[in-house]
Amino acid sequence: MRAMPMAAVLTAALAFVAVLLAAALPRALDRGADDALRAYLRRQGPAPTSLYASARPVPGQRTPQALDSVLEALRARTGPGTGIDLAATGPVHGTVTMTPRGLTNPELKHMPGDPPPPTLLNLLHLPRITSHARIVEGHWPGGAAEGAPLPVALAKSAADTLGAKVGTVLRTSPGVGTPFLAEIVGLYAADDPADPYWTGLPCPTAACLSPTWRVTAVVGADGLERFGSWGGSVQDFWRLPLDTGTLRADRLATVSAAVASYVAGPTAAELRRATDRVELQITSDLPRLFTQAQAREQAAAPLAALGPAGLAGEALVVLCLAAGLGADRRAAELLLLRARGASRWGVLRRLLAEGAVTVLPAAALATALAVVLLPVPRLAPTLVAAGAVTLLILLAFPVRVLVLLSGPGAAAPRRRLVAELLVLAATVAALVQAARRGVAPAGAGPDPLLVAAPLLLALCGGLLLARLLPPLVRALSRAAGRGRGVVGFVGLARAARGGGGASHPSLLPLTALLLAVTTGGFGATVLESVDTARHQVARAGVGGDAQVAAPPTATLPPEFARAAAALPGVRTSAPVWIDTWGIVLGTSQQGTQVTVIVADPQTYAELSGAVGRGRFDPGVLAGGAGGPDAPLPALFGKALAAQITGGGVHELRFGDGATLPVRAAAVIDGTPALPGGGTLTVVLPAGPTAARLPRAGLPTHWFGLGAVEEGPLRGLLAASVPKGDAGGYLVRTSAGAADRLAHDPLQASAARLFWGSLAGAAAFALLAVLLNLLRAAPERAALLARLRTMGLRPRQGLALIVAESLPQALAAVMGGGLVAAAAVALLGPSVDLSTLVGSAVPTGVRLTPRPVLTLALGLAALLALAVFAEAAVSGRRQITTELRAGDPR
């Protein structure tokens, strides 16, 4: 350390950075996996992430205390040590009727129809409803005299929908038994309709439309006995929500086993005995969700491993290069020690001790810093990764010295040829295997082939470049020698030789640069393809670049479509009327329910072409302006067309009883107006259809293409509809949908990991270039000093350094770009991007030049700056410093 303080500092810095990256990697992976697991489960909602217990009420007196006792037994098997932690929102329990009954009250509002479908009613008892809702009119239900209507409370919004009020007696259809009477004694409002407490309950806070109105009446504790006279299935239930915020990906197997025991295992059997409810059934979607979450993580693992694999290869090359530089610098000293009687193992022990003094403190500091900066519960993977890298750094220099002191073996050209052939054989085998079986399917975990193939290609590219670069540069130097100046000739001649006393360019710097560009270019192309596919999926889900949908049974204001077409960025405006209750008569099933879409043919064709679903020629919908009985031309979905038993005219019947004659003008493969692109559809031209069915001229949906922003669209909608009604309208844009897909922590973690690894690889590549320059610096400095005595000007000295150093770096970067393109072409068709996109997409990655060129040119610029900086520093050295008597350089 006293003799070479700068070398010791650089060794410690290299060890610190390498160990820090190695220790941070498993912690970053743990954080990403935990965040992805928790976010995925949170998106499912509280109902699927809960344990749901149910049983028929026990015969005899039904009391809230009986429900509470089962709840306590269920909760006793959860908590610390059981693997199951319950959410802070708490359990939900009560009694519910499973079979709804239709209301016969003529004074209530009903859905249109002939006859109108009855409104359905359920009964529900929630012991703790008063903690989550408040009475806004009347009072909470209590007991009732025998024979009197059952007192119930109804949600205020549901009462407004039906036109009910306090005092209304709800009458159900007789069904199997006698009519059931329930009197509304109170109207309540939920403190927070989005509270997880209401999740999974049958329409507790508002009326539901599916396809008729459905409401739920809340019954008090004194009314539990009346549930037996409902005439249908009644069930006690207990829902225990899981605390997803405490789950860890590494403990998922333990939690999954505990949940499985709760659902169908020893815990379930024990609970049936403890509660005296032999019919107690415990169900949950958690096992399925755990499996899906684990499959998502494993599906993203192959692509997420690309960046760290490239960084690991880059770091290994730089360590070998640093070890080679150190061995060259100290070769004379070490050979002298051997000549004076030191054994090889004695020299190696001394080098290990020297390395431990600088490497171990730096490694310990780096590991501690990684633990502090990335707090995660698991420590073992961090220590293993940090220890492995520390050992590698400690052994790199002694192993290189051992080779140096071992004396000559086989001829160097022969060793090099054998090594090159082995690498080539391994690369060809990997590519053949990739073409034969493809990349590991989603859910199979990291694929060694996908990780190793780009690295092997980069290594092959480095070997090929090391073979081709010297003759190419020599040809350039001969061309430069025919000119008047000598700077270019001398610089290129030294570049062809390799500098530093070598007979050819060093392979390690070339490999480092090729690794950085190849893995970075391949990964950047994958992420570019992910972004492109994500925007395509978002556009297909929205039905265009923007969509505005009216609530059920409502339409958009007539002036909205005209104003929306004038918004900035809108290039196509398509108002559409949609009816989901149409029926086409005369099919193989006598009648087939379809979705009817009425739109302007021209704009709808543009929308279909942009989304890529349901493309057609707008001319086929022309000619529908005949008489009132003339059939309208229509587009039939392919599933509907397959059910048509004969050609000609078919009758299309709407939900209100209106009919239209239609004829199939063309068959389409879907529609952008429906999220699933359903093929049980009928598309009609807007003008002729509205002339015969006036309500079809009032659009229920609006679709737009172009750079449509969600904010102005919502503002326009708020100004067009009555105040307070805008909340029922749906506003979506493809940009917002793509942004939501991109905010999946699993995808964000994979992208962060890749870009972080790429930044580290670029830094190591830059370090490799600097080490290579440093390796040749003493000889180059002496040459410049001698040339300065012959009249070489300082500016010419800088040009000579650039001419010597820059060709190798730029050639490696450009070669890396070509190898990255080859990796995409060879491996891309087998890569499945569905997990990173957030939706199912076709398998394959297409080669796009932009990410590869951007990465290659950026790294080339960075390396050029480094070369110019080193040239400026080397050019300022004094002649008297370099021209020393007896200097062999």
Image (spheres, grey):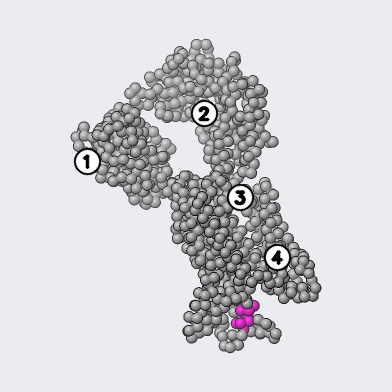
What residue does disc 2 label?
Answer: 201
**How many residues crowd around disc 2 within 10 Å: few (fewer than 14), some, or many (20 or more)?**
few
Tell me the distance, in whole angstroms, between the alpha carbons under discs 4 and 1. Answer: 85 Å
Range drawn in magenta: 777-785
Residue 798: image quadrant is: bottom right
Location of residue 455 with respect to 727 vertically, above or below:
below
Query: Residue 800, percent across and down?
Result: 55, 79
Tell me the distance, in whole angstroms, between the alpha carbons under discs 2 and 1. Answer: 51 Å
Element marked by disc 1: loop
Query: Residue 245, percent across and down?
Result: 61, 41
Tell me the distance, in whole angstroms, between the alpha carbons under discs 2 and 4. Answer: 69 Å
Query: Is residue 166 among what the camera can see?
Result: no
Which of disc 4 and disc 2 is earlier in sequence? 2
Circle 1: residue type: Gly
Which of disc 1 and disc 4 is earlier in sequence? 4
The answer to which of 493 and 542 lies nearer the viewer is 493
Disc 1 to disc 3: CB gap under 8 Å: no
Quadrant of image for the C terminus: bottom right
Element marked by disc 3: helix
The residue under the point 60% across, 35% down is 242
**How many residues crowd around disc 3 within 10 Å: few (fewer than 14), some, or many (20 or more)?**
some
Tell me the distance, in whole angstroms, between the alpha carbons under discs 4 and 3. Answer: 32 Å
**How many residues crowd around disc 4 within 10 Å: few (fewer than 14), some, or many (20 or more)?**
some
Which of disc 3 and disc 4 is earlier in sequence? 3
Which label belongs to residue 623? 1
Which of disc 1 and disc 2 is earlier in sequence? 2
What residue does disc 3 label?
Answer: 29
Circle 4: residue type: Val
